[in-house]
């Protein structure tokens, strides 16, 4: 009968006859430990790397010729004044596959246009927008509530008249498509919101019974960045 020691030595002897000498046990263990360490380092390095931008995300640059934030404000309960801003800039990023995206739009306050020069001048004074001190309005937000590749809202913040407050935009139209003329990808949307202008420190007319509620209507178009 072959003893336990002899049985354990058979594989080694067989291996030597086949021309292969098994590595000493100590060397094998060191090799295994080194392999495990290398694998651990690779996993740790991968975890520390910043996530790659989604390949499906597209960044669009605002087209100022087709983007006009407009508004509607009360005039003593008698009528509504309507106006818009003629100069805007910014970007929109959309990943319809992941259901994510962001918006950043800057508005030049001195481009306000009521369709009446005298009213435009009054609106820029310190009693209203104080455009000399606060020349820009900025909106930054994230798309939310995606369904069928389209978001329903933008959750963001509006900085106006030196005050920053949350403003949620409701999206009523949203589309991305190749432009039929320049063959680049285009983005378009309509959005709306309601704000209380007195919360931004613009309360002119409040003592005369002006309603501080302002309806915002934003049309925006943007072209994919090259």
Image (spheres, grey):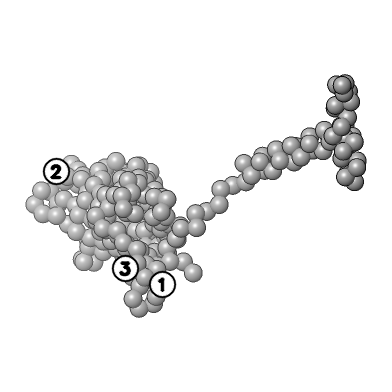
Disc 3 is placed on an element classified as loop
Q: Return the residue at label 1.
A: 184
The one nearer the camera, 190 or 201, is 190
Disc 2 is placed on an element classified as loop
As displayed, is residue 40 above or below residue 80? Answer: above
Query: Which label lies toward us, 2 or 3?
Result: 3
How far apart are the alpha carbons under marks 3 and 1? 16 Å
Residue 60 - label: none
Residue 209 - label: 2
- Crowding at label 1, few (<14), some or many (≥20) Cα neighbours within 10 Å? few
Which residue is at 46% across, 66% downward?
225
Marks 2/1 in contact by CB < 8 Å: the verdict is no
Which residue is at 14% across, 43% downward?
209
Is any atom of residue 100 visible in this view? yes
Residue 66 - label: 3
Quick one: label 2 or label 1, which is nearer the N terminus?
1
Instruction: Give the x, y percent position of residue 111.
Output: 32, 63
Image quarter where the N terminus lies is: top right
Disc 1 is placed on an element classified as loop
Which residue is at 88% across, 45% downward?
18
């Amino acid at each position: 009968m072959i003893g336990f020691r002899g049985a354990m030595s058979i594989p080694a002897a067989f291996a030597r006859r086949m021309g292969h000498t098994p590595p000493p046990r100590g060397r094998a263990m060191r090799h295994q430990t080194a392999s495990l360490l290398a694998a651990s380092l690779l996993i740790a390095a991968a975890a520390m790397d910043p996530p790659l931008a989604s390949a499906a995300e597209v960044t669009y640059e605002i087209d100022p010729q087709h983007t006009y934030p407009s508004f509607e404000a009360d005039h003593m309960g008698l009528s509504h004044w309507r106006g818009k801003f003629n100069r805007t800039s910014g970007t929109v990023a959309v990943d319809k596959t992941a259901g994510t995206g962001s918006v950043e739009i800057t508005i030049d306050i001195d481009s306000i246009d009521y369709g009446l020069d005298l009213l435009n001048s009054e609106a820029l004074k310190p009693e209203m927008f104080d455009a000399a001190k606060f020349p820009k309005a900025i909106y930054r937000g994230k798309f939310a509530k995606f369904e069928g590749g389209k978001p329903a809202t933008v959750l963001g913040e509006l900085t106006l008249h030196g005050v920053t407050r949350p403003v949620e935009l409701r999206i009523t139209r949203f589309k991305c498509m190749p432009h039929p003329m320049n063959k680049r990808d285009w983005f378009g949307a309509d959005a709306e919101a309601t704000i209380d202008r007195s919360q931004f420190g613009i309360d002119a007319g409040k003592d005369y019974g002006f309603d501080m509620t302002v309806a915002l209507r934003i049309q925006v178009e943007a072209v994919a960045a090259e």
